[in-house]
Image (tube, rainbow, N blue to C red):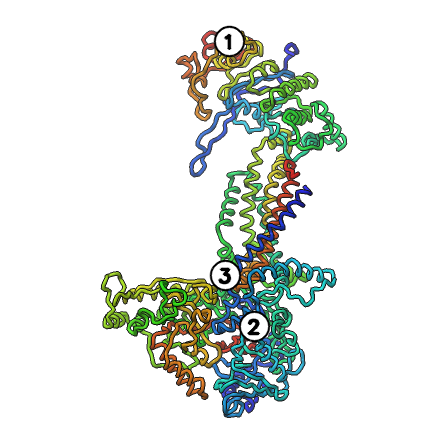
Amino acid sequence: MKLKPALLGAAASLAFVPMAMADGHSGERGRDGAVSIIYWQAPSIMNPFLSGGTKDVEAGSMVVEPLARYSETGELVPWLVDEIPTTDNGGVSEDLTTITWKIKPGIVWSDGTPFTSADVKFTADYCMNPEGGCAQITKFEGVTNVEAIDDLTVKVTFDKPTPFPYGPFVGGESPILQAAQFADCTGAAASSCSEQNFNPIGTGPFKVVEFKPNDVITMEANENYREEGKPAFATVTFKGGGDATAAGRAVMETGEFDYAWNLQLAPDVIANMEKGGKGKPVAGFGPLVERLMLNQTNPSPDLGPEERSVIRPHPFLGDPAVYKAMSMAIDRPLLVEIGYGKAGKVTCNWVPAPDAFNSTSMTCDKQDIAGANKLLEDAGWVDSNGDGSRDKDGVELSLLYQSSTNAVRQDFQALIKQWWSEIGITAELRNVDSSVFFGGDAASPDTFQKFYADVEMYANTFNGTDPQSYLANGLCDKAPSPATQWQGENITRFCNEEYDALHKKLSNTAGLEARAEIGKQLNDLIVQEGAIIPLVHRGRLSAHANSLGGVKLNVWDSELWNVADWYRVK
Amino acid sequence: MFTFTIRRLILTVPTLLFISFVIFMIVKLSPSDPTGNLPLTIPSEVREQIREALGVNKPLIVQYGLWLKQFFWLEPRIYLEHAFGWDLGTAGETRLISYQTRSPVMDLIMQRMPQTLMVVGTAYLVGTLIALPIGIISAYKQYSVFDQMGTLVSMIGFSVPPFFSGVLVIVLFSVMIPSDSYFWLPSIYDTTHEVTDWESFKFQFRQMIMPVMVLALQITAQISRFTRASMLDNLNQDYVRTARAKGMKEKTVVLVHVLRNSMIPVVTVIALGIPSIFGGAIITEQVFKVNGLGQLLIIAIQGGDVPTVQTLTFIFAILIVLFNLIADVLYGILDPRIRYD
Amino acid sequence: MLDTPKEPLVRVSNLKMHFPIYGGLLRRRTGEVKAVDGISFDIFEGETLGLVGESGCGKSTVGRSVLRLYEVTGGSVTIDGRDIAHAAPEELRKMRTQMQMIFQDPQASLNPRMKVSEIIGEPLREHHAGSAAERRERVLELMDQVGLNRDFANRYPHEFSGGQRQRIGIARALALNPKFIVCDEPIAALDVSIQAQVVNLLEELQERLGLTYLFISHDLSMVRHIADRVAVMYLGRIAELAPRDDIYAEPLHPYTKALLSAVPEPDPSVEEKVERIILAGDVPSPSNPPKGCNFCTRCPSVMDICKRDEPEFREVQPGRFVACHLFNQTT
């Protein structure tokens, strides 16, 4: 690797350079032969703009690349540019409405043609075409104009001050497509371009030889890749399909594959596989949190369709004693142990990562049944009719607790139901098939958006490292309702003026530290006001063969972000 | 027989149309969403735009009509163009596109067909070839040790699901046996492998052993039981005694007289089972990552990919109707007592 | 024929055919059905021995055992001087050219997937080396012999009527020029109008080819018509064996008497006078026959000894054999 510290962003170079030197692996391109990767969800398409599925984004990331991406520590690193534009270096305008990217000179596509600003502009037009059904359109939110100033300079203009302008062209979900290849594939024609969508021309370390949708991708090293001696592997077999168990087995037990993605398996299963001795699991933690969402509206089936889970308040979940007791009764370390093992951590926060945004103001790692009982007792909730659940003014602490169908979630449901019963709250459990639960069908009563239950449990996360749009999921006007065909991300229907005001402030603040401070306040507010009970900070567990070197599990971007640096341990 | 076949063929047209409509409505009305499997980070407006671009929001009858046109009119013409190099004016028309891969469904099916036929077809063949002798000997030596063993194997084949037997053989042959051993077998099927020489043939053979045998166990169980029952029916018939009284060799009695008659129902059962080869073996394909038609179907169902599900199930329906007819015709050919005129 | 010098072609002595019964969890042998329990008789060359008895008395089993279509439990069967019951399989197969069988159900006994020419020609191919054309000629000749139209050679059995099918069965049996044919109720499944045709055909063939028959039937009048001597079976044993005229004129065994009294008389005036002997009770189970004489449970002339000792099957008059204690005392 040729070191150009002066050209690299300061933060990136610190993270990057010493490791590259320490690895000490170099040589000619393709020296290590073949590498095989298994994803138990099979990629359907190589164009991330038409899918949005993680498997497709990550498969695509080996071929098509963004201008900048996130490193394994969650920091922005320049990729096809020389430096990250900031207000300090003048790349972002003072009024926060424009960002100007300067492309690294000399980059060529795998077909040998030069990579220019026209490709970048084309990519923006491609995704922003309203008829294309672009899955990554949110990356381009607020973009009014993308302009190619010269061959290597692109200027993006936003409709309002955008303190975090790193949406377009950053991260695996927003790579650059080749204008020449996709010229005829814009708008409604996007779907019919299977040849282009399966075999995109990219700037990445590999290029597609054969793409078998939902099955296997064969790739070979890109001879026009910009870095000398990379990638170390000449060919890649990217197999898809099956289940996480089989994928883990193929890497850690039989040694047939070198890398297995996202092993969502019980901790003891992973531990057993590790004994196979052929590979090891690696964990990485993004902002994914398994949480309980508490309905802030009344989900009573007695209400009509226009009112159910629409009108406020909830009969009892608004009482701080109730939601605090519910949280105190939960033994989070036990949940982590049985549900996620190495791939889980206790958290009290809605936004547990990146580190700067992780609030430390609350603790919740100790179960306190007695304390929870006392809290309810003091608030006047007693079991006056002896039916096992506390009540007050004729309102019973009895709730419907739903989740998607998934072994770990059903274990969690059973445990939490037990703990709650110990503090006099009865829970009725329900689980819904995940394709229905998350399916978003406005006609179905079983979607998580409709929330026809008191409590529901699922996990959510955000892409990239900035939680602003994720924190927007707590804004009043994002609540799903019949008026919005039950669309909207504020699932709990949390509504708090202070929160809305604080979020507005966040959207006008630049500078990481200040933003992190507001972010933590927002996090604390929504948790303390009882809209969300965070349970487990979930990491992602992948496994690689002992003989595969250079893997740096990255949860902020594609896991395969540094596949160019992978090599065979000799 | 000929008029019978023609009459039946004509009758299948309304049947198939009805089936296609029922399948369409079932698939459409089931609560699935092509954007359902996308990460939650993708907001609902974007999902709506994706659905709009896929045409999910059009009236059902329009979608059904379009599917009919694409399946019965456009795709056959495209096939003919590819096969004979004609120009039937299909350029520019929108083909039957999968929601998931945004590529023509027919291409996906054609791509999957070889590995499914290779693995499931071989399993069917192997299973049948094992089943016939087992069934024949079991019946001839009813209640012997061999028969009892055959019964046991069939019970196992019937009762052990492939997600158990498949994983069991993987643990035995891929995990417990070291990978440098001669007896080690790959647990993941390589669909890109091409047989070009003896070495690559050996590899293909090795990677097919486990999925084929797991599937063949089930097929063997069914067909051997059926053969046994049919043989037993015939072994006690008077004509068998006649053959013995004629002084025929025992081999002739069993293999010519009894077997030929016993095969009539067995052959029809085998014919009726052939569509299931094309249906693939959803579970076994998943276990060994064969990624054939069965896996295509299950992924399409999970992904709410209506065009793929609809087309695949409909093709299975065609095959089932067709092979029912073939079984009937075969019956007529094999059994001189049956005439359809 | 009776006056020709007699030479026993078939000699059956103490033939036993017991079928095992399995039961219980492990399918152990728990008993046996004594379908044929020690019978002996001779059949002379060129004669017809009628074998009569009720359904289930074991007469068909006798027919099949004699040709060793069953593996016999005990006793011996000699046909033309060779022991059938103990011959090695290959030897036996060669001996089958000498002995053939005509079955009761002409439909079931013909392989439905073979054409008539194949059915008749198969034994020729198996046992004789003759060319295809010769065999073909022989098949057609046989069809002529049994009165079948030659044009039907390429038809399947189901395309024929019952009588025609039985003719196919006869032609098939004749194909190898056997000396001895067991006719196992050959007319039972046929219409009455056809029965006579088939019986006449059998008689005609016997005359022409010098065949020896074991004619098994429950139809006493048909047996009277065709048989030279008649054996009456009851529960796995022969009760009485005698020349036809003797037995019909003066039956000795109480069972024979009862059986013959059941035959309807064509003359109504005689019919009225016939005194029917109605036997009480049912035939005992062959898996558990009564002790002593097996007819003792139903015999109108039962004596104490009958319930104790098994009567010997012995010649009480020249050519007449009876197994009954009534006659043991008289001699």
Question: Quarter-wise, where is residue C297 in the image?
Answer: top left
Q: Is residue A53 above or below residue C43?
A: below
Q: Where is residue A222 in the image (x, y as percent from the top left)?
A: 63, 77
Left or right: B59 in relation to A497: right
Q: Distance between the residues labelled 2 and 1?
A: 104 Å
Which is more toward the observer, A175 or C136? A175
- Badge 2 marks a residue whose secondary structure is loop
Q: In this view, does B110 lie above or below B252?
A: below
* Mark drawn on residue A254: none
Q: Mark 1 lies on which chain?
A: C
Which is more toward the observer, A521 or A497? A497
Question: Given contact means CB atoms under 8 Å apart, are the residues at marks 2 and 1 in contact?
Answer: no
Q: How far apart are marks 1 and 3 (CA)?
A: 91 Å
Q: Which chain carries label 3?
A: B
The kind of residue on which mark 2 rests is: Gly
Give the residue number, with chain letter if any, for mark 3: B176
Q: Mark 2 lies on which chain?
A: A
Give the residue number, with chain letter if any, for mark 1: C272
Q: Are marks 1 and 3 on the same chain?
A: no
- Badge 3 marks a residue whose secondary structure is helix
Left or right: A509 in relation to B93: left
- Badge 1 marks a residue whose secondary structure is helix
